[in-house]
Image: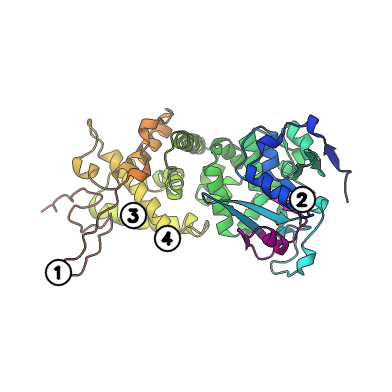
Amino acid sequence: MGDPVVIIPAEEHPIKLEMIDSDALAILRKLKKAGFSGYLVGGGVRDLYLGKTPKDFDISTDARPGQIRKLFPNSSTIGRRFRLVRIFFPAKKFIEVSTLRSLSEFDMDGPEVVLAPNNTFGTMEEDARRRDLTINALFYEIEGQTIIDYVDGSRDLQNAIIRIVGPPEIRLRRDPVRMIRAIRHAARNSFTIEERSWQAICENACKLRLCPPSRLRDELLKDLYSEASAPWFELAVQADLFCELLPVYRKRLKDSSTTQRQDKDLLQRLFQTIDRLNRISRQHGIHRQKDFFLLALLLTPWAEQRYQLFSQQRSGRLLFQLGKNLRKDLDAGIGTHLNLRRSLRQEIVTLLLGLALLIHNKQKNGWPNRLKKKSYFRSAQTFYNCYQTALTGEPLELRHITDIREETAPQITPPGDSGKRLQRFKPAFAPNSADGVFGFARSPAKP
């Protein structure tokens, strides 16, 4: 089918058995004892080769899903067209085991192709060649502790190269999300994308519009939490992928004016802030910020450019109306494009408006007490700190971050015996609430 397979003996590669998760080893040994082959595959082999601790230890085998289930009662099957078996362990841990496959679901002709179950299974070589990148197509077997390489992935790892498996023009058109993954691994590992693969990515960036919005959202969020989103942003802008993911910046970043450079510089600093936020949270055991928090940070340049949200002060009904307009544009700009939940969109709007209020009401000693008493204040303050450090270029520090687990939710008093119905809370930005907008009373009407 292709080039001869390369078998790398144990003494010529850095992976050792003691580096592999004990539960993954137990699965591989049980498969072997039952007469099946079993291999550590994909990102787990890549990360071990690079001296990193893998997030997942995925396994491939020639056993069929039903046979895997019989071997491991503590398991369940997921997937429709290509079934995987998840084997469960204590502490909500699971390891995914797949049968060697001949095709990627995105390399099949037509979205509704139905194949007989035995037509989806394949050989090791077929399984390697249906993967996205050469560095993700390596197999490790524990008996001889060898790496099995059908696509020169080991050489690309040694040379720090990202290369798409097969003809990149065809593979990217069949599944455009492979472009995002190529850039992701280049950014995370400081690798260079091979010339033909890079050219195909740049020429097919617009094909991302053909992908389901939920896939684009999930891939974007993976990179936002990766702690390597800043170098990812640089590559994504160069390849025109960033504007396909966040089309609200398409005109701004493709303009050659000074404004374009300012927007790009601020976005770059925001990505650096996001990386530092995630790194500090991980190192200090702080619960990571939620999806809407990171997305809202990325939308601050757009909100300022479109509404002068942070440079012009508004209050009362003007601020309430601004919130409605902001939500409407957010829905049209990225809400449907990334299939964001309605609640998540509203959280983004709330953070952006809250940031404007914190900016305009900052005092020498902090903020007014009525604002600091609000349940959402500490989260809004972290958002303010992230934005300000990105503006000034100063590094985000631990003292700037609030653990969201410390936030106190509004307490609802149970109805008493009076029979009165429990009233709903008014929205945070309701113009008629007693405390005004975000805790600030409205100014009295002028005569």
How many angstroms separate mark 1 from mark 3 (CA)? 38 Å
Residue to which mark 3 is pinned: 323
Residue 342 disc label: 4
Residue 123: image location, x then y, percent: 82, 54
Name the amino acid, label 3.
Gly
Left or right, 373 with reference to 303: left
Q: At numbered mark 3, what does the secondary structure look like: helix, strand or loop?
A: helix
Q: CA distance from mark 2 to mark 1?
A: 67 Å
Left or right position of 318 against 295: left
Sequence-first disc among 1 and 3: 3
Which residue carries the number 1 mark?
417
Q: Residues within 10 Å of mark 3 (few under 14, many from 20)?
A: some
Mark 1 vs mark 4, foreground winner is: 1
Q: Nearer the viewer, mark 2 or mark 3?
A: 2
Q: Which residue does the image show at 24% across and 42% down from the upper left?
A: 372
Q: Nearer the viewer, mark 4 or mark 3?
A: 4
- The residues bearing labels 2 and 3 have C-alpha atoms spaced at a distance of 60 Å
Comparing labels 2 and 4, the label whose residue is closer to the camera: 2
Front position in the image: 101 or 167: 101
Range drawn in magenta: 59-84
Spot occupied by residue 389 in the image (x, y as percentages of width and height) = 40, 32
Does dot 4 land on a helix, a strand or a loop?
Answer: helix
Q: Hey, what amino acid is under mark 1?
A: Asp
Residue bearing the label numbered 2: 32
Q: Earlier in the sequence, mark 2 or mark 4?
A: 2
* Sequence-first disc among 2 and 1: 2
